[in-house]
Amino acid sequence: MDCKNIRQLIIDSQHQELDWSTMKSIEEHIANCEACKELSKEYYTLFDDLNQFKFELPDEDLEMGFYDMLEQEKVALKNTQSISTASKLYRLNPFLRIAAAVALIVGGYTLGYFHSQQAQRQEMTLLTQEKIQLQTLVTLSLMEDKSASKRLQAVQYAKNMEQPTMDVLKVLIAKMSHDKRVNIRLAAVNALSQFAEKKIVKQALIKALEIEQNPNMQIEIIQLLVAIQEKQSIPIIKNLLQNHQLPDYIKEQIQYELEQLI
């Protein structure tokens, strides 16, 4: 069984819908093929996330609208699909958003197998692009979930992205600045630390420090600003030291961090 067959059957294998011999062949192939093993992991992670979503069943009109959208997505996948598609899908309601993600998987990973080395490289490049789109869709969807655990999970997904899109960075920044849960704001700062050299992140950290009232968040942001030696934050940090409501031990920590920056 070659990679092409595996990619066509891998979704069914995740749902245990194949006979024993076929499942065994798939397992043996995946054990010896790094590309298919990685793809199988991506499917498993995605379907695990999708299975945790709870949403209402659509009415007949919405269902018809979805199938029209699904056909449009399949056609769009034949051309180079830009990441703006992910942004548009992100704004849809949960049912359409997750269903569209599945459509992207089915359309993206059933590409034909190429035999030449050059064609294989092109295929891997395309799969990588679609993987990034898929990660972005799931991450952006979970970021807006009402469940704090889902939002925290999305922040972790974003942290693990090697090259997050601008949409992902903006949502991470929003979570750092405005999420009502402190643990999610702290996780967002930690995730942004990997991208702290980007101008948009530096500016967001300084702005967040100006409005943040939680001492733990203040220390976390200051430590990151010190780590990247962001001198523009010095006036804001000094201003914090004038806050008489801050406990002495917090002021001592801030003073120590400030000395590392000056």
Image (cartoon, rainbow, N blue to C red):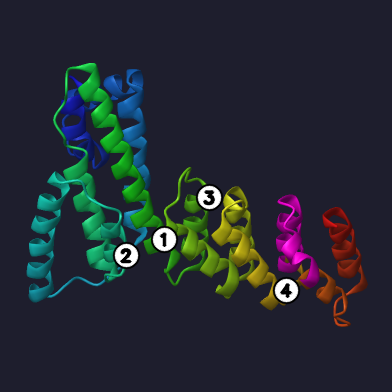
Name the residue rendered at 19%, 52% in the picture.
Answer: 103
- Assess disc 3: are there few (<14), some (14-19) or many (≥20) residues with their C-alpha within 10 Å of its C-alpha: many
Name the residue rendered at 24%, 66% in the picture.
Answer: 95
Amino acid bearing label 2: Tyr
Read off the magenta span.
Answer: 217-235
User: In the image, residue 139 lies at what x, y percent?
Assistant: 41, 57
Q: Which mark is residue 167?
A: 1
Q: Earlier in the sequence, mark 3 or mark 4?
A: 3
Name the residue rendered at 18%, 45% in the picture.
Answer: 106
Mark toward the viewer: 1 or 3? 1
Q: Which residue is mark 2?
A: 90
Q: Earlier in the sequence, mark 1 or mark 2?
A: 2
User: In the image, residue 152 lies at what x, y percent?
Assistant: 52, 60
Amino acid bearing label 3: Lys
Q: Nearer the viewer, residue 58 or 217?
A: 217
Apparent side of residue 216 relative to residue 253 in the rendered image (left or right): left
**Residue positioned most to the bottom:** 244
Amino acid bearing label 1: Asp
Q: Earlier in the sequence, mark 4 or mark 2?
A: 2
Pointers 4 and 1 in contact (C-beta within 8 Å): no
Mark toward the viewer: 4 or 1? 1
User: In the image, residue 73 lies at what x, y percent?
Assistant: 15, 55
Please, what secondary structure does the residue beneath circle 4 have? loop
- Assess disc 4: are there few (<14), some (14-19) or many (≥20) residues with their C-alpha within 10 Å of its C-alpha: few
Name the residue rendered at 8%, 73% in the picture.
Answer: 60
Q: Which residue is mark 4?
A: 214
- Tell me the CA gap for discs 2 and 3: 19 Å
Please, what secondary structure does the residue beneath circle 1 have? helix
User: In the image, residue 166 lies at what x, y percent?
Assistant: 43, 58
